[in-house]
Image (cartoon, rainbow, N blue to C red):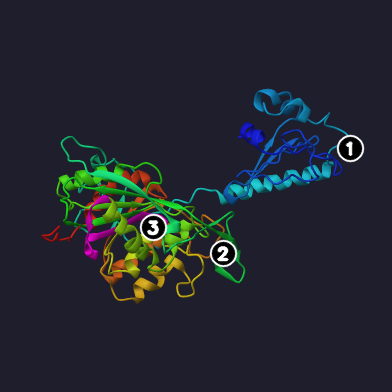
Amino acid sequence: MATRTLASHYLLRCYSQHEPFLDSHGTSGFSRPQPCTSKRRSKWICLENCTLLCALCLPTGRIIFSAILVSTADFFSNAGPFFPVLTRPFLPQPLSGNRFMSQSLSKLITTSCLLGITLTSSANAQPPTRKFDAPTAPKFERVDGTNGPNPPIDADGDFLIGPKYVPAPERTQQAGVPQGRVQQFTMDSREGERFNPGIARKVFGTVDPNNPKTLIVDTHEIDYTRKITVYVPAQYKAGTVAPFMVCHDGPKGSPKMLLPRILDNLIAQKRIPPMVLIMIANGGGDAQGHERGKEYDTMSGLFAEYIEHEVLPLVEKNCEVKLSTDPDARVAMGSSSGGSAALIMAWFRPDLYHRVLTTSGTFVNQQWPFDPAYPDGAWGFHNKLIPESPVKPIRLFMAVGDRDNYNPNVMRDGMHDWVEANHQMAKVLKEKGYHYQYLFCQDSGHGVGNAKAQFLPHAIEWIWQGYEQPANE
């Protein structure tokens, strides 16, 4: 880190308060550093006797303190090998006397930096491992060798899998299996009606002192492009109507072939109907104040309507397919906020989607801007909406890791525990009589990547259970 940081950022020499600093180009500056346009800013401070090397970094708006206690003599004698960008003209003269900060100020900065290290380690600590038999967890049925690595394909309920996983063979290309075609096109926000313009922020927001359920975020408008990646199965016959899956967080670059290969194999084995897959890239950024957060975490039917009226017509036109209008022939799927977006689409527009597949679903309070009609964001699904609403025709697959997200940002509203959110979702779905399957994945974190390698083909097959393909498809 040090070489790269010092090469591209400001080097601060702290003498007495009357002395200037030298920037990384060796020119004299003011009594404080000039703004740095990089995503990361660093100030290197050499202190008398205690010799603390302190870096203050600001990546993506999160303050990180790191401190290294070194010997002054060792530091500068090794400046060449370890810090080649520190050339002699930039180095202070003998580190003694009144040219440098006083001992008291040195100690103060040392203490502050060490405190920063402690705070940072707490803020960046790994989420705790939650036990499958915790008091608030549903009662899980353990999946073991007696019924295969995944739950039965026709079963509803709560299942415990892991901690060891075996990647599914359906993930790879199989000899003799027909391969579908994959093509891409790009959408420009300036040509759209909804989500035009987009939004973005430069720094993460601060908790609203008048409403701890939301943030104060400074945003600005943006134009953006969105890549659409479409898979059409080899079995598709021109002119017929095809069921389809919408997948959030689609690739922003070249196509990713994992899902197409899984569908190739499942379709060839007649475990799912031949279907079109539409992978839609997000609008950029993440969470409150960014376009992705606005699209995925907003509690309304707006994103479903955007896809219906602005994305799907272009898919039909550019890829020469006809897409089903039957909500039972449509799946919305995604991970993290993409997962909550999938459920939001089906919940607010059940006339468009009946089937939802989620991993590490963000059923927490991430909505921004604040909406008093849904003050808890997606956390409201399990604490109000599902329990207090008539049952909707939704079939839902969920999976979460035992080390999934826990209070990952500055909000402390009691509604940012991904595991607890998914646990409560499973409970209310069961109480209301929904068809759902919930996997609690041991030794797995946010996104459950290691577990998903095993269960994703199973989840896709499960979500299509009960679908009856019409004769014209």
Which quadrant of the structure image shows residue 325? bottom left
Residue 327 position by quadrant: bottom left
The label nearer to you, 3 versus 2, is: 2
Which quadrant: the C terminus? bottom left
**How far is the residue under mark 2 from the one under mark 1?**
46 Å
Q: Which mark is residue 215?
A: 2
> Is residue 372 part of the magenta span, yes or no?
no
* Element at label 1: loop
Dot 2 amino acid type: Leu
Q: Is residue 177 left or right of residue 278?
A: left
Q: Which residue is at the front of the view, 349 or 402?
A: 349
Q: Which residue is mark 1?
A: 98
Give me the C-alpha separation between circle 3 and circle 2.
21 Å
What segment carries the magenta color?
Answer: 319-340
User: From the viewer's perspective, is residue 77 above or below residue 293?
Assistant: above
Q: Secondary structure at mark 3?
A: loop
Disc 1 or 3, which lies upstream in sequence? 1
> Which tag, 2 or 1, sits closer to the chain's start?
1
Relative to 210, residue 336 above or below: above
The residue where tag 3 is placed is: 361
Question: As drawn, is 370 to the left or to the right of 427?
Answer: right
Q: Nearer the viewer, residue 462 or 146?
A: 462
Residue 438 visible here: no
> In x, y percent, where is residue 404?
43, 52
Residue 465 visible in this rendered orientation of the protein: yes
Residue 30 rendering spot, x and y as whole percentages: 80, 44
Three-letter amino acid code of the residue under disc 1 = Asn
Q: Residues within 10 Å of mark 2 (few under 14, many from 20)?
A: many
Secondary structure state at the residue bearing disc 2: strand
